Image (cartoon, helix red, strand yellow):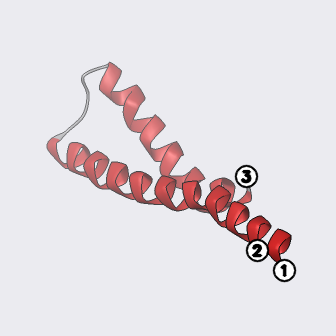
Amino acid sequence: MPFTIAFMMGTNNKLLKYAEKAKKDDLSVTETEDVDGLLKRWTFLNGVRGLFPLAGAVAAGIAIVA
């Protein structure tokens, strides 16, 4: 949760703002390009966020063995 708040909330909020504009068919070409960049950033950040449970499992496995 802290990672999401610290690193992803800004991206999430911008994407939500653009989603509201898209509902009204009010996106310019520049804004569409911004959305593409934001989605790439969100995909990367979500991948990083997804690695945290894996890191926790590895740490737990090491703790059990050690």
Q: Mark 1 and mark 2 in contact? Answer it, CB < 8 Å.
A: yes
Mark 3 Cα-neighbour bin, 10 Å: few <14, some 14–19, many ≥20: few
For the residues labelled 1 and 3, the Cα–Cα distance comes to 29 Å
Q: Secondary structure at mark 3?
A: loop
Q: Earlier in the sequence, mark 1 or mark 3?
A: 3
1 lies left or right of 50: right
Which is nearer the eye, 33 or 53?
Answer: 53
Q: In this figure, which residue is indicated by the disc labeled 1?
A: 66
Mark 1 Cα-neighbour bin, 10 Å: few <14, some 14–19, many ≥20: few
Q: In this figure, which residue is indicated by the disc labeled 2?
A: 62
Which is nearer the eye, 64 or 6?
Answer: 64
Q: Earlier in the sequence, mark 2 or mark 3?
A: 3
What amino acid does circle 3 point to? Answer: Met
Q: Secondary structure at mark 1?
A: loop
What amino acid does circle 1 point to? Answer: Ala
Which is nearer the eye, 30 or 1?
Answer: 1
- Residue 23, position in %: x, y? 34, 20
Q: In this figure, which residue is indicated by the disc labeled 3?
A: 1
61 lies left or right of 18: right
Q: Which circle, 2 or 3, is nearer the viewer?
A: 2
What amino acid does circle 2 point to? Answer: Ile
Q: Which mark is residue 31?
A: none
